[in-house]
Amino acid sequence: MNLPQARSRGACALFVFAVISAMTSTAYAGGFYLLPRGVRGVAQGGAVVAGSDDPGALWYNPAGLVYSGRQFLADFTLPIQTVEFSRINAGGQREPTVSSTSQPLPIPGFGLSENFGLRDWGFGFGMMAPTAALNNWPRYVDGPNGQRIGAPQRYTLVSMEGSGFGNLSLGAAYRPIKYLSLGLAATAVIGVFAVDVVMSTCDNGVLCKQPEYDRWDGEAKISVPSKGGFPAIVRPGGAAGFVIDLTGKAPVRIGGSVTLPFTLSGEAEFEVDLPDEQVAEFRGAKLSNNTADFEVKFPTIVRFGVEVRPMAALRMEVQTTWENWSVQQEMKVEPKNISIEAPLLGKYELGSLSMKRGMRDVIAVGLGTEYQIHKAWQIRLGLMYEKGSLADDYFTILTPDTDKFLTGLGGTWAVRPNILIDFTAGHVFMRNRSVRNSKIYQPYPLRPAPEPDSDGTWMPGEAVPLGNGDYKVEASFVGIGTRYTFSPW
């Protein structure tokens, strides 16, 4: 392999890595759900597994459709996440602090349940999106002398504007005996992506010895757009659940559900703007193709809850959730006949690539209460603790999933007996992180990125860690929704 060809391989490798990483974070943000879904769900810390009794059961526990009756649900949750990053670069210097506040995009949920006059049956249909935060970051910042320099996080993420995901669900539940309900739901994960990142074409040692010098930066715009008005990605999934209702004998209801794993895969398109105006070797460079197949595994999710009703006006539930994120140890990608060619580069074909993720399983515990203070008013309080899915060495601003403690407050106003308005607000306290042993490296054109010395001191020619530095993360949320109950058959 000649030097120009090797350098072109490194350029391609970086933007393909960035494609897969940014898509995953866009889909589920955090580890990867930033908040429990829905106005009632987040107000109760996700503790609506045993007590599901509206179309939101399609998300938490499809067995709850038996209790939903003929009901319509529409809600919107607005998460606002702020991330602050003070990076320590490969040379050990602290770079200018950058921050991002997520776009103010309400996350929707719509659902309809129907029993068709059948007392022991429930059916549901819905379109519900996970509560994700969409962050945009600066491309440039002011340097110490007032000059414009590349933003410290640019090799990880610049923008995810135009991305979105949701679940289309169809479910049914049946009560075979008095105290037991069973439910199933078929789902389709649908969505579109749009991601902007920066890549470096520096070879870190021969022609360029400053691997983070922004003169050698190029830009990549990656997208999986809608096709003819239809979502670009459609992947099947499913869920199953049960409810044991002992309220006829004791004030207890027990529920559990399993959401099946799925694989997110498809074809990504990208546009690459190489630094041809500044770096002579890239003048006139062209890509022979602009597509790559990708594959990312998503986890099994298991929920379990116990609801007690010590009095008619009070419902309390404790729940636990396990998400098998350790299934995502890498992201696979297969470029489709991609080569780069230029007068000074020659031509080089790009082979298979993959990226480490190093994720670990997530466990969350939530407590939710609902109290009827008046025939027209209910109040809710929720608490939740969730362990982050990423250890320090794999932590970046791309998926800033750290330990969370959620506090939620909400309620319901019964405008009429069959028209309910739900509302909520709360805050998520997220543990700050200080990373000094990052295993997320800038890809290299000449060879696989070597591990740094055991003492952590970077030397020219070694791997450039991208995640070292200090992180501050927090989030708040508000939400509003409505539920409408139709007259019985």
Image (spheres, helix red, strand yellow):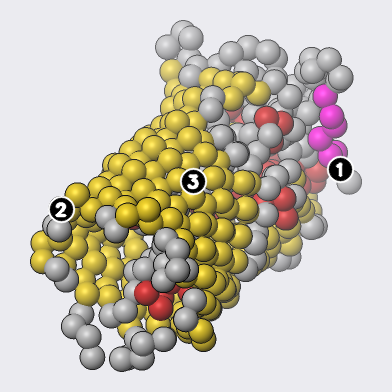
On residue 374, the disc is 2
Q: Earlier in the sequence, mark 1 or mark 3?
A: 1
**Type of the residue with mark 1:** Asn
- Can residue 265 be spotted in the picture? no
Q: Local crowd at mark 3 within 10 Å, few (<14), some, or many (≥20)?
A: many
Residue 447 among magenta residues: yes
- Position of the C terminus, as image quadrant, is bottom left
Q: Which residues are magenta?
A: 446-452
Task: Identify residue for label 3.
Answer: 366
Q: Residue furthest top?
A: 145
Residue 427 among magenta residues: no
For this view, does 483 lie left or right of residue 194?
A: left
Towards the viewer: 432 or 116: 116
For this view, does 83 lie left or right of residue 16?
A: left
Secondary structure beneath label 3: strand
Q: Residue furthest left?
A: 416
Residue 408 x, y percent position in the rendering:
35, 41
Towards the viewer: 179 or 360: 179
Q: Main secondary structure of the magenta part?
A: loop
- Can residue 432 be spotted in the picture? yes
On residue 168, the disc is none
Above or below 55: residue 328: above
Q: Earlier in the sequence, mark 2 or mark 1?
A: 1
Q: Earlier in the sequence, mark 2 or mark 3?
A: 3
Q: CA distance from mark 2 to mark 1?
A: 78 Å
| Label tally | 3
Secondary structure beneath label 2: strand
Name the residue at 49% across, 50% down: 318
